[in-house]
């Protein structure tokens, strides 16, 4: 059945037409949306924006290097059960009492559709994405200890982010709708920034954006400043009462934008 609500961004998240289209296609086809892009392009914030725009609950599964696919399904707390049995706690024979659902399991159990964010999937080992193929395809999993099949009551909208630290398996990629968030150009960046400020001085914005992209275009910079750092920098410039025409020359509060020692030196040398 076609979705009734369209994602158009929010008052604080400005999405490109291509990104909005990718979200819509993923929802229509009921496939996970895999989002890649350099840090600071709003990959994680996309899930928050979709949840807010569609008025749905957001569940976040933060992936670490030690995360296993099983963690997102359920965990059987054998240690707690052993502890309870030693102290004569009631209900210790009820294994279901010691089954703790992970974020994927929680999403399946919800009575209403939710947004499930699987954040930074490439941090896990190479087998992690493949271990989720069945669950993401069939929207169900089996709990061995209780002989129960947990099947999604309403298929969640799944958004997966990756920083491209590792290549993802082809079998996993085939099951996803893919979108790469390119770093916003100056026009889109103005819209993004203005969504975060009220009555931002136009000349200040222009000079800050000009300097921001000049820094990003320096070839040897290892960590290019991101959108969130530009927003923080603008706040610092406003608080400090910096004259817009001095920004390019003096580079005030440079440490808000540039976070590596070697990058700071390169920017300063280029600005002499």
Image (cartoon, grey):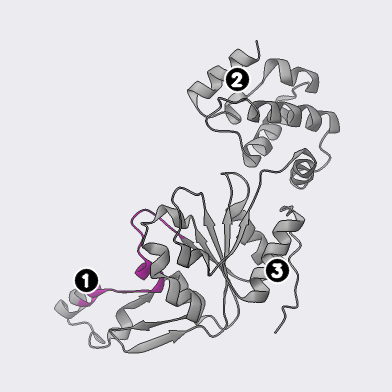
Identify the mark at residue 267; answer none if there is no mark. Answer: 2
* Residue bounds of the magenta highlight: 62-81
Q: Position of residue 250 (x, y in %)?
A: 69, 16
Determine which residue is flagged by label 3.
24
Number of residues whose C-alpha sits closer than 10 Å to that of mark 1, classed few (under 14), some (14–19) or many (20 or more)? few
Determine which residue is flagged by label 1.
79
SS under mark 1: helix
The residues bearing labels 3 and 2 have C-alpha atoms spaced at a distance of 41 Å
Q: Nearer the viewer, mark 3 or mark 2?
A: 3
Instruction: Judge left or right: residue 143 versus residue 83.
Output: right
Q: Nearer the viewer, mark 2 or mark 1?
A: 2
Q: Position of residue 126 (x, y in %)?
A: 37, 58
Number of residues whose C-alpha sits closer than 10 Å to that of mark 3, classed few (under 14), some (14–19) or many (20 or more)? some
The residues bearing labels 3 and 1 have C-alpha atoms spaced at a distance of 44 Å
In the image, farthest residue toward the left: 86
Instruction: Judge left or right: residue 40 versus residue 3.
Output: left
Q: Which of the two labelled residues, at mark 3 and mark 2, occupies the earlier sequence position?
A: 3
SS under mark 3: helix
SS under mark 2: helix
Identify the mark at residue 182; answer none if there is no mark. Answer: none
């Amino acid at each position: 059945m076609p979705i009734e609500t369209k994602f158009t961004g929010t008052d604080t998240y400005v999405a490109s037409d291509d990104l909005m289209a990718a979200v819509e296609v993923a929802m229509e086809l009921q496939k996970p949306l895999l989002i890649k892009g350099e840090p600071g392009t709003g990959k994680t914030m996309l899930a928050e924006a979709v949840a807010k725009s569609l008025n749905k609950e957001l569940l976040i599964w933060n992936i670490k290097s030690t995360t296993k696919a099983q963690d997102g399904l359920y965990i059987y707390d054998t240690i707690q059960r052993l502890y309870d049995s030693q102290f004569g706690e009631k209900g210790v024979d009820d294994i279901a009492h010691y089954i703790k659902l992970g974020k994927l399991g929680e999403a399946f159990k919800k009575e209403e559709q939710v947004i499930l964010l699987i954040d930074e999937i490439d941090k896990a080992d190479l087998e992690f994405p493949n271990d989720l193929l069945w669950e993401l395809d069939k929207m169900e999993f089996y709990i061995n200890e209780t002989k129960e099949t947990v099947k999604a009551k309403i298929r969640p909208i799944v958004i997966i982010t990756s920083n491209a630290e590792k290549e993802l398996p082809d079998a996993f990629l085939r099951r996803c709708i893919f979108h790469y968030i390119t770093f916003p150009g100056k026009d889109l960046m103005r819209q993004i920034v203005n969504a975060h400020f009220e009555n931002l001085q136009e000349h200040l914005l222009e000079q800050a954006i000009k300097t921001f992209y000049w820094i990003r275009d320096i070839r040897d910079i290892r960590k290019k400043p991101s959108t969130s750092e530009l927003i923080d920098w603008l706040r610092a410039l406003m608080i400090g009462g910096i004259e817009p025409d001095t920004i390019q020359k003096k580079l005030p509060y440079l440490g808000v934008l540039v976070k590596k020692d070697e990058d700071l030196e390169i920017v300063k040398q280029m600005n002499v």
